[in-house]
Image: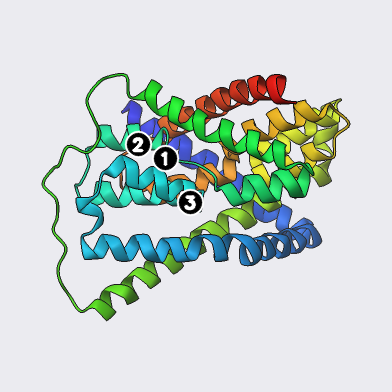
Amino acid sequence: MDIFFSRLKTRTIAAVIALLSCVAMVLLPQVAILSAQKGIALWASSVLPALFPFFICANFLSRLGVIDKLNPAAFTFSMSVMSGYPVGAKIIRDLRIRNCISLRDAKRLIAFCSTSGPTFMLGAVGIGMLGSLKAGIIISAAHYLGALFNGIIFSLRGGTIGGRKNVNTAKFANIADMLTEAILEALKSMGIILAYIVLFMFATDLIQFSGLLNLFESIYSRAAVKGIFEMTVGCSSVAYTAVAFEAKTVMCAMLISFGGISIIGQSLSMLSGSGVPGTYFLLTKVMHAFWSGILAFAAVCIFM
């Protein structure tokens, strides 16, 4: 009975938020259209070229049965590092669906295999926003070391990841059919990501337009609030604040490691069916941001 009322409450809240969003779009069509245009432009120029090939590759390898024979932790972390959010979550879900790993393994993997890509941190944030390659290197190092440290903390219950379970062996269908299925699934995943980007772009623009950010006195706090919703917008806002450069570096490291509600939503959609609780994943991202912030602070004290 308690579970029923809990689910009813959650659905009611979701319905109210969706209804209010529809009303806001009707009352503020210019904001809605501009947000959608910015979101689609960001997706088409940056996200699609970066993630689409990786999704096709991962899906195709999964259908060929290659992933079943690789070390789950090493493969997932390396793919997450190379491609960025939310590829790690997608691979973990695939491994779980194929019964290559247990739910316990999936929960431990997501603690350190949900990361951003080096191109974004070094190029977009370090050089593009902060104007410093050194800052990009510090952010990247803190982000990845924080992820590894996070994985260790969440894996303290013992055991190693990757004990082989009853793997669903790949059916050797026509190679062209498997590639086509991999492309179609990749397109579906990219469509989900696009939807989350547009929705949260609208959310941040609506907050900005409504004046709610004026409740926060400092520009730094306003930038942090934006970053909680969308990390790219948050990092850009942090870069233009009148605070110490070292503080900007630490804050960007924390925002990227947290990912923002937009990235968390994308990752949870990719994890659907894996059994990993949303609250658990949110906790791993909060802790990842915490460790990355500490490591970035130590690095700026030593190297800047």
Q: Position of residue 252 (x, y in %)?
A: 68, 35
Q: Which residue is mark 1?
A: 113
* Amino acid marked by disc 2: Leu
Q: Is residue 217 above or below residue 64?
A: above
Q: Which residue is mark 3?
A: 82
Q: Which residue is mark 2?
A: 109
* Amino acid marked by disc 3: Met
- Work out which quarter of the rendered image holds the C terminus and state it: top right
At x 57% / y 28%, what residue is drawn?
A: 289
Q: Nearer the viewer, residue 152 or 273?
A: 152
At x 60% / y 51%, what residue is drawn?
A: 119
Quadrant in the rendering for residue 149: top left
* Amino acid marked by disc 1: Cys
Between discs 1 and 3, the one toward the N terminus: 3
* Mark 1 touches mark 3? (CB < 8 Å): no
Q: Nearer the viewer, mark 1 or mark 3?
A: 3
* SS for callout 3: helix
Between discs 2 and 3, the one toward the N terminus: 3
Q: Residues within 10 Å of mark 1 (few under 14, many from 20)?
A: many
